[in-house]
Each structure stands twice: as structure tokens, then as C-alpha cells.
Image (cartoon, grey):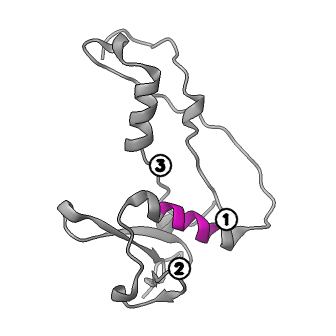
Amino acid sequence: MKDKHSNCLRIRYIGSDSCRLFTIQRGDFRFWTGDTWSMVLDKAKVFHDHGAAATAVAALQYQQYKGLPVRAFKLELSIVLAAGDVGAISREALTKWLAQALRLDVSNVEYGDGPVEGSFVQTRLRLATLEETVPRRTHF
């Protein structure tokens, strides 16, 4: 049995919540060993943090899709910050927190790497572009 999109990659959590580790699994249920793909979980390369696994996934996806022509789009993302002394929280503190806490995931194993077969959508949050705007409301 395999997923509908067998070449798509996902980061899998393994281990307990107190000692979470990560592997990379393809839609055909094979695990990345660091060199090749294997059906055996014990041969999978283990990553100690999600960021390292995400970097490896990006490198694998680059190898799969390199050389294809691209188009680019922008999508607005809204962030609301609420706190008792909200004015005391700096843009830098918010940016640092977002860099550590925020993840943008695409459910590519369920929906494919892009809108049509053979296409790939890559998303990026460019935190350097964070700017404060006038809120639509004054209280949360």
C-alpha cells in the first residue's frame, strides 16, 4: 500500500514526547537513510530537531525539482499580538519568537507537491519583512 502521492516527503516524529526525534518518510512509506530510501525504520537517518529534518527535506526536494521554470506569488499573513503591556514587546522580540515557534507546513503527501502532477510549491516566511500595522481592533 502507498499514499496517493508516493514521491512526496514528510517529517515523521518518533520517540516519546520528552525525547522527540525525527525521520523523513516518502509517500511510499520508505525512510531516508541519508543516502537512499529503505522500508526499514531502523535504517532511517535520525534528526534531533525538526529544523535539521526540514533542511534535509528541502535539499531532497531541490534535487527532485531543480531546473524547472518558476513563478512567484505573495500572500499576506496577519499576526495579532495581545499582552497586558503590548507596547513593551519589541518587533525584534516578536520576530525572534516567531522564528523559533512558527512552522509553515504543506500537507503534500495528501495533496501533492503542487497543484498539478510534476509541480512543486515552496513556501517561505520572510521574517525580515515583518512590519507593524494598525490593528482592526483595540482589544483581543
Query: Which mark is drawn over residue 6?
Result: 2
Query: Which mark is drawn over residue 101?
Result: none
> Residue 113's quadrant in the figure?
bottom right
Q: CA distance from mark 2 to mark 3?
A: 21 Å
Mark 1: which secondary structure?
loop
Kindly identify the amino acid type of the residue bearing the numbered disc 2.
Ser
> Residue 25's quadrant in the figure?
bottom left
Query: Which mark is drawn over residue 104?
Result: 3
Q: CA distance from mark 1 to mark 2?
A: 14 Å
Q: How would you rate the neighbour count of disc 1 (Cα within 10 Å): few for under 14, some for 14-19, many for 20 or more?
A: few
51 and 3: which one is in front? 51
Residue 77 colored magenta? Answer: no
| Labelled pair 2, 3 in contact (Cβ < 8 Å) | no
Q: Residue at x 74, y 68 (%)?
A: 66
102 and 116: which one is in front? 102
Q: Is residue 96 above or below residue 18?
A: above
Mark 3: which secondary structure?
loop
Mark 2: which secondary structure?
loop
Look at mark 1 in the image and give the residue it sits on: 116
Residue 55 colored magenta? Answer: yes
Q: Residue at x 41, y 28 (%)?
A: 94
Kindly identify the amino acid type of the residue bearing the numbered disc 1.
Val
Kindly identify the amino acid type of the residue bearing the numbered disc 3.
Leu
Q: Is residue 18 left or right of residue 126?
A: left
Quadrant of the snapshot with the N terminus: bottom left
